[in-house]
Image (tube, rainbow, N blue to C red):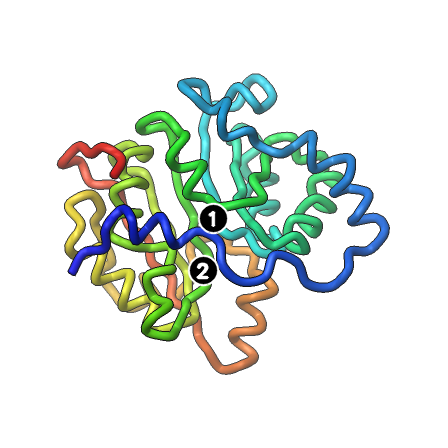
Amino acid sequence: MPETAETAGRAMLYGRRKGRPLRAHQQDLVDHLLPEVTLDAARLGTAPLAQFPPGLSQLRLEVGFGGGEHLAHEARSHPQTAFIGCEPFANGVARLLVDIANEHLTNVRVYPDDAGAIIKALPEACLDGVDVLFPDPWPKRRQKQRRFISDARLISLARVMPQGAPLRFATDIDDYAAWTLARIARSPHFIWRATKADDWRQPWPNWPGTRYEAKAKAAGRPSVWLVFERNAFPATSAP
């Protein structure tokens, strides 16, 4: 049975928010840099690029950026694109702040909380791409309603993505890959255009690798790389 908006709303924040104590330099960045680069969801309105430096022409969202390796790589590779990174885990945010400071990545804004709030606040058809990388699989049956990808979530994402915009999803959990494909298959808003096995066995071009991916590989869990596309029909409204 398709998940409801209420179910998706419960899939917000679970688990730990902080791990090891931050190093002194990281804590200093959290205290002083994080307030400068934190995105204000209430101000997104109809001008989502207003909280970025002028001159940026596109906007992308990364959900659960972990240690920030991929997000920092994308930001430096696409300096004319604005990036919103959502990650509630404090240690991951601190690691990304080091890259932002060292490389002067002015095109990154951080939301250290639930990505659902950002998706809800964004205006229609404003995101040129969304990356969901190695989300928590919530493997137990009673936990699966907490998964980020759901029927209701796909409707919410479709509202803020124009036709042709990519939704990229990576996981090392076979069950989560199957779960996601099942929901894409029954969604009228997205399509999977894969034509061969390597379309999901190989990461997308210029993938920099992440700490989590390396740990999964060392544990014998190969990753799955799924790229979906925002379909042209039908239009949608947020649930």
Q: Nearer the viewer, residue 21 or 97?
A: 21
Residue matched to label 2: 135
For the residues labelled 1 and 2, say whether their Cβ atoms are less than 8 Å apart: yes
Q: Residue at x 66, y 35 (%)?
A: 105
For this rendering, which residue is in front, 2 or 29?
2
Is 137 placed above or below 55 here?
A: below
Between the C-alphas of marks 1 and 2, the distance is 8 Å
| Quadrant housing the N terminus | bottom left
Quarter-of-image position of residue 32 = top right
**Residue 137 placement, left or right of 30:** left
In which quadrant of the rendered image does the C terminus lie?
A: top left
Residue reaching furthest bottom? 220
Q: Secondary structure at mark 2?
A: loop
**Residue drawn at 25 percent across, 42 percent down:** 155
Task: Identify the residue at image location x=39%, y=37%.
Answer: 119
Residue type at mark 1 is Val
Q: Is residue 109 above or below residue 57?
A: below
Q: Count neighbours of disc 2 (C-alpha within 10 A) and say few if under 14, some if 14 to 19, many if 20 or more.
A: some
Q: At numbered mark 1, what does the secondary structure look like: helix, strand or loop? A: strand
Q: To which quarter of the image does residue 199 belong?
A: bottom left
Type of amino acid at the residue the image marks with label 2: Pro
Residue at the farthest right position: 24
Q: Position of residue 100 (x, y in %)?
A: 69, 40
Ranked by sequence position, the earlier of labels 1 and 2 is 1
131, above or below 1, in the image: above
Q: Residue at x 52, y 37 (%)?
A: 84
Q: Residues within 10 Å of mark 1 (few under 14, many from 20)?
A: many
Determine which residue is flagged by label 1. Answer: 63
